Image (cartoon, rainbow, N blue to C red):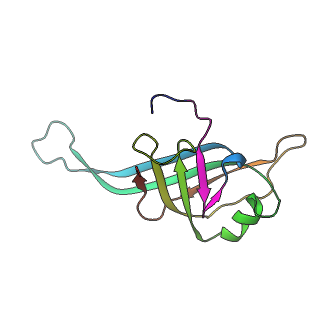
Amino acid sequence: MAKFAATDYKVTVNGTNFSTNLNSVELALESDDLETTAFGGTFRERIGGLKTGSVTLQFMQDFGASSVDATLFPLYNTLATVVIVPTSGSVTATNPSYTATCLVNSYSPVASSVGDIATFSVTWPTSGTVVRATS
């Protein structure tokens, strides 16, 4: 897959496909920065430490059966599996999937202004390893 426009991401939460209810997705991965500079060094030396991640999703709210609210509300304060794939096609080396177990520690079922699309954003920290798959 070459450069592409982000128009077809597939995002699932505990197996429920929310692609048509999302307009933004971000998976952010970081690691601790541990300094190892010893006496005599003239530049700082560093190694990577513990890793962390977060998933940010911008939802368009839907209160229908088996939709956004019905799925996310019961997950509040529990762990959920989030899978992100760049396109809705099969997972391949050029369309990898990223799977993370996330702590659903925030949810705003109602967060909108008069006349606007009912949207809300969540940022959930990952718990454990984020897995990148190519098949």
Q: Is residue 121 left or right of residue 40?
A: right
Query: From this viewpoint, which residue is outermost toward the left?
Result: 40
Query: From this viewpoint, which residue is outermost toward the top?
Result: 3
Image x and y of residue 60, in percent? 75, 48
Rendered residue at 71%/64% (across/down):
71
- Image-quadrant location for residue 108: bottom right
Is 80 above or below relative to 85?
below
The N terminus appears in which quarter of the rendering?
top left
- Magenta part of the protein: which range? 5-17
Rendered residue at 58%/34% (across/down):
6
Image x and y of residue 43, in percent? 19, 37
Of 61 and 116, the residue lying toward us: 61
Disc count in the image?
Answer: 0
Q: Is residue 100 left or right of residue 46?
A: right
Image x and y of residue 69, in percent? 76, 61
Rendered residue at 57%/30% (across/down):
5
Query: From this viewpoint, which residue is outermost toward the front?
Result: 90
Image x and y of residue 135, in percent? 41, 52
Of 43 and 104, the residue lying toward us: 104
Rendered residue at 9%/42% (across/down):
40
Of 39 and 115, the residue lying toward us: 115
Q: Is residue 96 left or right of residue 122?
A: left
Q: Is residue 38 left or right of residue 71?
A: left
Residue 73 located within the stretch drawn in magenta: no
